[in-house]
Image (cartoon, coloured by chain):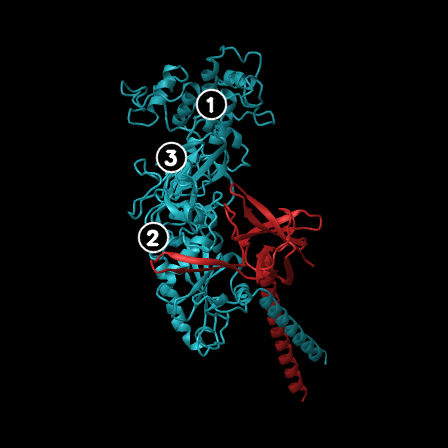
Chain colours: A red, B cyan
Amino acid sequence: MLRSSGRWMRDRGKNYRKYWIVIILVILATGAMATMVLAQTVQEVRVKWNAYIAAPAPQVEIGKEQPSNIFTLLERRSAPGLLPRQRNPELSSDQIVVIALDTQGKEIDWQIIPDPRILRAEFPGPTGELRGEVLHHAETELLITLPNDPSVKELRLYHPHWTGTAFILDLLGTIPLP
Amino acid sequence: MRFASLLDNSRKWIEIACLTLLLTCISSGVWGEPVTTIRNNGDPSNRLDLVILGDGYTASELGKYATDVETFVQGLFTQEPFREYQRFFNVHRVDVTSNESGADHPERNPPVYRDTALDATYYCYSIQRLICVNTSKVNTVVSNSVPADSRDVILVIVNDTEYGGSGGAVAVTSIHQDAVEIILHELGHSLGLLGDEYDYSPPPCNNAFEPSGPNVTRETNRNLIKWNVGGGPPTGWIELTTPIPTTSTTAGVPGLYEGARYCPSGLYRPTYNSKMRSLNFPFEQINSEQLVKRFYNWVAPIDTIEPIASNVTLPKGQNQTFRVNVPQPNTHNQNISWKVDGQTVGSGNNFTLNSSNLTIGIHTVEVLVTDPTSMVRNDPMEVLKESWKWDVTITISDIFSDVPTGHWAYDYIIAIYNAEITTGCAQDDPNTPENERKYCPEDNVDREQMAAFIIRAVEGEPPLNYCDTGDPFPDVTPDMWSCRYIKRLKELEITTGYRDGTYGPNDPVPREQMAAFIVRAVEGEPPLNYCDSGSLFTDVTSDMWSCRYIKRLYELAITTGYGDGRYGPYDLVTRAQMAAFLSRAFLGME
């Protein structure tokens, strides 16, 4: 009985060591993955955008916020990957400029993303030449990628407005981030 | 009892660790839709990444989906400039599974509704051929499945053969045979920021001011047309013989064709037809130029460089290979040129810097990569160029592999190397990365080496054929490497050889002989009675033949002896000691 008990104790001791090896390996793997994830992460912000384009917009000064846009923050999370970067970003009226600010109003980052409101309906006519319409979604969603920096507290969205010689950024709205 | 308790605790820890691992996986977005990279041409951070999602494909149709995507991608990359720059793209296929096959057709009688993952529907906004998808669902799939830097352009392919599609932030197409054409036109907008060149309205015509797109203008002055910078070739596209406005109907002739951007007049396009006006036409020159420049907005001409550090330290005499990897166009090569201190020294992906010819100090190595494509004539932002510069510090360390920096005679040996008094006892093999050059500091100096050292220090290298006119000593023949030095040494009266008339080129050099050689080389013979007033070392007596040389050597601060009052006149001179004596005697070192 004593011998049996002693062997059981030794076996438990071996198992105990095996478990600890497993635990250490799991912790190491978790740590390595966490390190990797933290090293190359971005912040993704999803925003619902109600753009009441169809309604007559009140007259606003250029550069002032357009009151017809309602932005609702849906999600803010960390995600794997690096920030997408452009070497020579160019503006167009089909894009949105997103500027990320901290609580002091200091610019942390900016991105140019496609304007999700725009919907092109283009089809060849009888002669083969295209014809079409440019429609605007009244309700859409923005997926914005930012640096994984907790100091980002506000997003400002601008629409590039072409004057014939230059682009002017019209403020579409601001999105406070919690 | 104690073990059992520990075991229970360890199980808890395993559970906690597994939970942590699980949460980490979830937070890192591991649980997205399956993604297959079907064109992998490089690091996504320096490639244009196309993400293709399918809608209306059931689980059993994913094989068909893969085939449809492959057909589409092959079609995409058969057209210029996508064909030439296809290796600038990665393509990721996301396998999105729908519950039902096809897409909604609310216009049909009876209406057809399909339960699909991205809610694709025809008759969007009551336009028969307009297909819309649920942007929120697209964002969810993309966000969960594809890293942020791997989704520059998002396309959705809908499993329906009826013609249809849409453009915008997400381009959508059916699997109709014209799917590729629809997407290429939409990429012209979203990727190339190109304007429509068709003149059908709506959308409303607005020709009151200059449009922003690079392919539409209201300008009719040849020299001011945006695609004719410089008024014509080589930077502009309109030949001087092409009339403005242009009325030719010949395809692919750059000019100024009236009718563009929903206006039949008042706005102009660059070619008679193009993919921005009609499907199944090429993009043509001006649109291709813009697209290539836009490709380079995401793809830098330099992929990677080696070494990564911009500051490189290189011991003189060693080689350093610099390397640049570049994204490769399909049928032409990037121009890669290398410069050292502003002077062009090479081309190609690799350049090996031989530091032997560089002075000690900081030098620059620069690589310039330029795409010489004929598709781009005007690149004011120079997006088709990229350069990288390294600061290379050439140091004097490790010239000789057997003389480490801490060697007592290091400075002396390097000094006589730089003064070209020695090249070492073994040379470096330029065909190997190792430094085989040695000085052999602990070897004894023999008399022929001594001759070479002193002659080089006094007046430099004698001509190679200096012994052709006769032997200086019977035991020194013209075929010996040292003959010219020994002959010159004799001519300068630094040596007269042994009393028997020989020189003894392979005899080792005692320190008293070395004193005589150097003093004669520096200032000639001291007076015979120079030691009458006494010797300066305990082991050098006044009656020794070498006393006057050793005494003078001390006075000239070329030796201090061993520091214990002795000079060691019969000790053999090592090459390290020789370096010290030569440096003090001829290079002014202490």
The residues tagged by marks 1 and 2 sit, at their Cα atoms, a distance apart of: 85 Å
> Upstream in the sequence, badge 1 or badge 2?
2
Q: Nearer the viewer, residue A12 or B424?
A: A12
Chain ID of residue with mark 3: B
Q: Is residue B346 above or below residue A58?
A: above
Q: Is residue B503 above or below residue B426?
A: above
Q: Which mark is residue B231?
A: 3
Q: In the rendered view, does A62 fall on the left or right side of B522?
A: right
Q: How many residues crowd around disc 3 within 10 Å: few (fewer than 14), some, or many (20 or more)?
A: some
Residues flagged by tags 2 and 3 on a common chain: yes
Which quadrant holds residue B20?
bottom right
Q: Which residue is mark 1?
A: B514
Residues flagged by tags 1 and 2 on a common chain: yes
Chain ID of residue with mark 1: B
Give me the residue at 31% from left, 38% from top: B242
Q: In the rendered view, does B446 fall on the left or right side of B144?
A: left
Q: Which residue is mark 2?
A: B282
**Residue that lies at the very extreme toward the left in this rendered image:** B469
Q: Nearer the viewer, residue B353 or B502?
A: B353
The percent position of residue B3, horizontal first and vertical second, equals: 69, 78
Amino acid type indicated by mark 1: Met
The residues tagged by marks 2 and 3 sit, at their Cα atoms, a distance apart of: 24 Å
Asked whether residue B453 appears in the rendered view, the answer is yes
The percent position of residue B514, horizontal first and vertical second, equals: 47, 23
> Upstream in the sequence, badge 1 or badge 3?
3
The residues tagged by marks 1 and 3 sit, at their Cα atoms, a distance apart of: 79 Å
Q: Nearer the viewer, residue B208 or B576?
A: B208
Q: Secondary structure at mark 2?
A: loop
